[in-house]
Amino acid sequence: MTTMTDFSRTIAAIATPPGKGGVAVIRISGADAFRVADKCFLPAYGEEPLSKRPPRSAVRGDILMDGEKIDDGLAFCFPAPHSYTGENTVEISCHGGLLITRTVLEAVLAAGASLAEAGEFTRRAYLNGTLTLTEAEAIGNLLEATNLSQIRLASRESRNRLSRTLAELHDEIVLLVSTLYANIDYPEEDLADLTNEELTARLSALSERMEALRKTYRTGRTIAAGVSTVICGRPNVGKSSLYNLLCCEDVAIVTEIAGTTRDLLERTVSLGDIPLRLCDTAGLRDTDDRVEQIGVERTRARIEESELVLAVFDSSVPLTEEDRRLIASLRGASAAVIAVLNKTDLGQADMTEVYAAFPHVVSLSAKEGNSGALAETVADLFTDGNIRVGQDAILFGVRQYAAFSRALELVNSTLSALREGIPADVAASELELALGALSESDGRAVSEEIVDSIFSHFCIGK
Ligand code: GDP
């Protein structure tokens, strides 16, 4: 870890995943990148070494290890600062075999590069100012994306929009702080750009703008992290079938014997735009069966810690006492609860009690496979339909959100203090704290530990 910020090192790593593939890419970055590449890459035509070729163009050539040809491929030079890391960078594409890739990397290391740590390329990009921390975090999410809306959320357009919005808010606070200080330092002279009234109005507009961005977090978090979801219901109502429907394949064993779903199955699935971290369970019931008991206890624990409960009922038959116990046990649950009336294809019994107990009720047939209404209800509960994912600035990281919320609180308290006629110096120092919190949120001022923890989630070569 200590070597991470050592810019004197020229680093190298395999940027593509390990395994057999069409091509693999070895990335080299640092002051010595071109010298290292010239030692191990010999252009196939012309006299000029790789480093003297036109930037960002493909050059064919041989890859050498101590002078011996080990592969042939393509190389690209990206002179600083126009590269991902902001440093001199070379990318060598070689044949994508496990051993050949590793051997090319060894050739690059033998030519003077040192092995990059996980996330070090992106970390350098951040430290060199080619990426903000917000953008780096979005790239981290992009690598983890399992669903199209997550890709949109982390897209270049979206992450640039967020970075720009945070930068504009930052600039506005800087202006307001400096105006407040100018008012204090030179009260007689008319140096200040803004009057007190203008200042209050600007601060109020700033607060509104920040509040609007703060609200996007609900949507951003839902998409980035998914919604932890538990499916519950008495035996045979169709929990496993619903789970399978959401998974779009048969992963749970569906049987007609009550209580066969003994343990928890967990999987992230996409319901419309929303990833659900889904848990199929043994259901909420009292049982003497020891194995099943374990499942039931875990289910209870899961309900406690989940954000969404899908309470499944068989709507083709009247409710049973077990169904009623489930309804009672979910009263006052902290999670959002959606009652799912399953088996609509088999007819309709009286479900008045379910409608009375739950504000959100969706009817479906897990057998026939229509989850559209459920997707809409989940989207209504967990996202804001006015937000255009992929286009609007959206907060999505918990670290970022916490710092941003603090900044907003400080802006609001400065505003009320100013309205109550508190001295300008007090207001100015409060607003400076807001600036600090915002700088933390957009990554201008974060501790080394936080930067370390963000980049530790990246893979080697990124
Ligand atoms: P679980 O015990 O709650 O997990 O219930 P299962 O998913 O194992 O389903 C119990 C039985 O009901 C199985 O025979 C399923 O095929 C059947 N089933 C589940 N959903 C439906 C449905 O929507 N319509 C019909 N007709 N049968 C269903």
Image: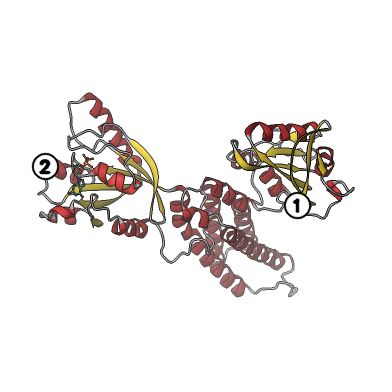
Find residue 58 and name its label.
1
Question: Is label 2's Cβ within 8 Å of ligand 1?
Answer: no
Left or right? Give the position of 317 relative to 440.
left
Visible residue check, residue 408: yes
User: Crowding near pointer 1: few (<14 within 10 Å), some, many (20+)?
Assistant: some
* Tally of numbered tags: 2
Counting from the top left corner in percent of width and height, residue 404 is at: 55, 54
Q: Amino acid at mark 1?
A: Ala
Label 2 sits on what residue type? Glu
Distance between mark 1 and mark 2 Cα atoms: 72 Å
Q: Is mark 1 within 8 Å of ligand 1?
A: no
The residue closer to the viewer here, 247 or 334, is 247
Say left or right for 320 vs 182: left
The outermost residue toward the front is 45
Per the image, label 1 sits on a secondary structure element best described as loop
Q: At 24% from the left edge and 50% from the top edge, which residue is drawn?
A: 366
On screen, residue 61 above or below 430: above
- Residue 321's tag is 2
